[in-house]
Image (cartoon, rainbow, N blue to C red):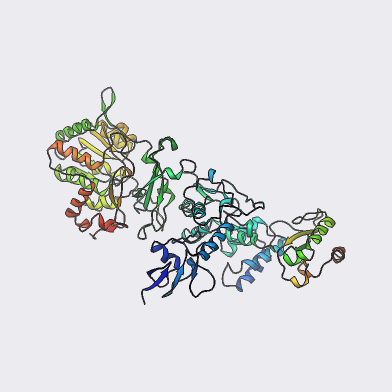
Amino acid sequence: MDKFTVTINGHTIEAKPGQSVLQTALDNGIHIPHYCFHPGLPVAGNCRMCLVEIEGVPKLQIACGTTVRDGMVVWSNNDRVRQAVRHVLEFLLINHPVDCPVCDQAGECGLQDYYMLVGRYDSRFAENKVVKHKKATPIGRWVMLDQERCILCSRCVRFTREITKTNEMAIFNRGDHAEIDVFPGGELRNRYSANIVDICPVGALTCRDFRFRCRVWYLKQAPSICPGCARGCNIAIHFNPERPHHAGGRRVLRFKPRPNPHVNAFWLCDDGRYSYPFIDDHRLRFAALREEGGVRQLYLKDALDRLADWLRASRSGRTAYLLSADSSNEELFAARKLLRDALGVRCLLPDTGLRTGDADDFLICEDKHPNTRGARILFGLGENDPVAPDRLEAGLGAELPELLLVNRADLPSPLRDKLLAAGTRLVFLGTNDNATAAAAHLVVPLVVFAEQAGTFTNFEGRVQKFELAVPPLGDAAPEWSVHQGLAERLGIDLAFPGPAAIFRQLTAEVDAFRGLSHESLTPHGAMIRHE
Amino acid sequence: MELSDQLKQTLDALKEQFPNGLSVLMPALHAVQAAHNHIPAELEQPLAAYLAIPAEIVHEVSTFYFMFNNRPVGRHHIYICGNLSCWLRGAETLRDHLADRLGIQPGETTADGRITLSVVECLGMCDHAPVMLLDGEFHPDLTVETVDRILAGLS
């Protein structure tokens, strides 16, 4: 039998044999309170919050540890269950300090949520609380430990044992002296450590980077894709539109993983998670023109006028474009239509952070760009691409280009100096400041991925969509709109009304993407057709 | 600090009787304690490496069970029960009497390193409450007088 029905709180629903009662309920939109259960971890059954009544079974059972049976009738909302869960929560709170006003978890805390649901509201506990040893103690680069807030659900212990297999977290001592900790003198030594902050249902593990920056209820979220490597882990960008004075003016305050069973399950590596500051720090906000006597800021439209003139003036075959694997599929497609197809510009993908040698067998990819696969497909890159820094000069052709457009990359300084000495006009299109931007004749500010919608193609060929989180800074524009603006000035007919329309055009013209649509990318992305 | 060769031989013999490193941990900790009086913190990592298990688990187990001492203890170790049956039958008086006689609080060791006093949970002899465990032997149906006699007989 593949499927049968169970009845939970009077709703008859289809269940998969072998699944737990709790998972079945959650999959069908019925929330049963739980702390220790996490869909990405083995079942522990220690918090006792998910007690339910099963008809025909005399005692209440934990929904996470009970497998569904055909015809099972389950109640999670009757008085008997409510009363039992209220007692469980009362026990869990016995040694909890209830220091919500100074706790960074407040607002996204399981204890607060369930206290509103089934709490007693009046404490009966007159004795002294057992005070644990460690308060606000760092246990790694990113994680802060407050033992007294812990309810010993053991999610962090199971994460380090089962997912990273590094075993750092453990429960020491016994009974009401039990406390989570790392080995005496040790610390977290895995590159996924901040996931234990995400899965901690209370304020025992908080993020050293995020804590006290902003109360979570000020944050808004946008679904996105981590730009840290070629894996394309699904994330939510948490940004703070209404309290710009918090966090030193940074708009984006953190990345949180978003589940995708095909890519990252429930997890995100620390490198990707803490890559977010580039969205607000050292950004290029306005176009800049280097002239005799210094650098002058100018409007984007004037910069595009200038760039169009330069493109017109450059002799055939003497313009080159260094594309970026940080661009979205839509941006790359716009560059392909204008620069490669209409203007015949030589397009190269420079190897900056593509072969770092830094990878593991879980999520971290060697290639530190989110869309190398997309760039390879859209520009038909072969064996010799991407071009290593020492072969970049040779890749630019027999003669140095008259006009070189560099997208985001920082050129090796010997090459940069040589180009400038040879009289090459250097145009930098990019999001963040670097030495190449500082040396360029013209700087065109681009938006980062979080400031536009688009798609990335991960290393496996999974096309995934990201949404706009924060508005562009200053004059920064999406790369496709820069190409569109140039096309208008050069009298080339390219109509790009927006990223959705570009994606439609892309799927119609590029074989690998044929058949895809924004609808088919929801919710977990879709694979390209294999080349 | 390293595991002694003698201890390693004992551990090797134990390992043969158990399917894996986790299952041999309890007897291994007993062996360490027998050799060193307590479980020295510096030996937890060498022991974990020898059994090929995480040091965190060794520390979990050694801090969980009351029969593993994480600090040095005296030549004699008194475990007096503090649970319900013994408490109803006067364990509290015996505990205070022992503390007075030895001049230490529960959990401490006499200055000469002779006797350690610990209050523990149920020892499983409620029908002979109050009881205490002294160097591995039960002493049932205790009174202040029998406790004094037992103390007088200690080396």
Which residue: 63% across, 60% down?
A175
Residue A187 screen position, x and y as percent: 55, 51
Task: From the viewer's side, name the closer residue of A93 and A11.
Answer: A11
Q: Quick check: A520 above or below B17?
A: above
- Spot the residue most to the top: A293
Residue A241 screen position, x and y as percent: 38, 40
Q: Quick check: A322 above or below A43?
A: above
Instruction: Specify the quadrant that holds the C terminus of chain A.
Output: bottom left
Horizontal arrangement in the rendering, residue A493 relative to residue A135 (left or right): left
How many labels were placed on the picture? 0
Residue B125 screen position, x and y as percent: 74, 71
Q: Quadrant of residue B47?
A: bottom right
Q: Quick check: A280 above or below A328?
A: above
- Spot the residue most to the bottom: A1
Task: From the viewer's side, name the closer residue of B28 and A197.
Answer: A197
- Spot the residue most to the front: A79
